[in-house]
Image: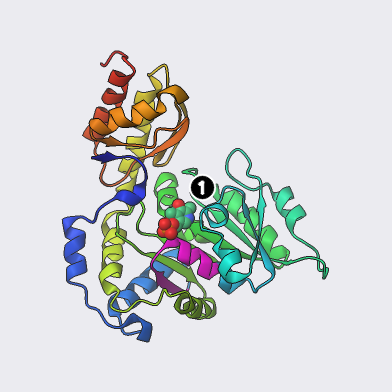
Amino acid sequence: MIDLRSDTVTRPTAEMREAMANAEVGDDVWGDDPTVAAFEAEVADRVGKSAGLFLPSGTQSNLVALMTHCHRGEEFIAGRFSHIFRDEGGGAAALGGIVAQPVDHEPDGTLALATLTDSIKGDDIHHARTRLLALENTFRGRVIPLAYQKSATTLAHDHGLSTHLDGARLFNAAVATGSSIEALGQGFDSVSLCFSKGLGAPAGSVLVGEEGFIARARRWRKTLGGGMRQVGILAAGCQHALSHHVDRLAVDHAHAQRLAEGLAEIDEIEVQGCYTNMVFLALPASHCPVLSEALESRGILMKAAPRTRLVTHLDVTGDDIRYVVQAMKEYFRQPVH
Ligand SMILES: *Cc1c(COP(=O)(O)O)cnc(C)c1O
């Protein structure tokens, strides 16, 4: 199957499985797993922070970051469509007693500085204390500009807030812009990175920050049930991804461009944007249920909805892209050339 539903669907390669099979392991809750320790240190170093923490998922990494930055009854500011606010099951409230203050995005995905300033509450016992600004890069595939990140994190720090970056796809931003991961993480007190998206590992995220912060985060990870034992097996898969799958993200971005260009030739499809490894489409609603089935019968998985996105990744080849464009053209009876 050619699976364009998400970049989470990648399967570990044979080389990655071999690295996992050969990993030296120990009990990581006791701090005995050398593979995890080395991986945490390498990721922290790459982002220019002093410590790292390996977690099973990006959701847990973000939640641990929220609970480490904010006490109960305190508040974080995040975009209305950010993953940390919208797509993590309300964990901040349910498990952390933390209030979310969602704010609108600008068309480019950023949060206007004036909006941020207005959203930071003054020192008044009526209000939840505003404690944290959480940004996301890439946001819906869009690269958030470095200059903006610098202004927003400076503004937050000037108001006494901490800053967190949900960098689930920060490596896509790095490859797309040529900026280093360190440059992209500057200004943030904590950064969360995922290895199970386009990087192709089966699971694993790393939260990085300064040592004291990560020591406190490590306690919350245990509280939330994220302390894992011989988990060097997973960290070895992530380490393999970090060593071998970062530069190739450029291929995914080129594939997304080719997919967008091909689909733009079909009258019934409106390509609304193509950012890093994501193509955003408007499809005629009447076709959606039939289109899904028609494509699935040709070995293509995508969410056919009036507004949808296709995501390229490690398991999608250039031939797959040509095949998908051709299958779509055939479905809509457009000339194939
Ligand atoms: C995928 C993702 C996460 C984490 O998701 P998990 O499925 O819990 O690993 C966090 N933030 C963003 C922006 C994501 O895309």
The verdict on label 1 being within 8 Å of ligand 1 is yes
Q: Measured from the top left, where is residue 304 in percent x and y?
A: 40, 33
Label 1's element?
loop
Q: Measured from the top left, where is residue 66 in percent x and y?
A: 57, 67
Number of numbered callouts drawn: 1
Asked whether the viewer can see residue 188, the reply is no
The residue under the point 52% across, 66% down is 63
Taking 235 as reference, is 305 above or below it?
Answer: above
Taking 298 as reference, is 178 above or below it?
Answer: below
Image quarter for ligand 1: bottom left
The image quadrant where one finds the N terminus is: top left
**Of residues 81 and 164, the one drawn nearer to the viewer in this rendering:** 81
> Based on the displayed image, in which of its 4 quarters is residue 101 positioned?
bottom right
Q: Which residue is mark 1?
A: 139
Is residue 86 left or right of 20 when viewed as pictured?
right
Region rendered in magenta = 50-65
> Based on the displayed image, in which of its 4 quarters is residue 186 positioned?
bottom right
The image quadrant where one finds the C terminus is: top left
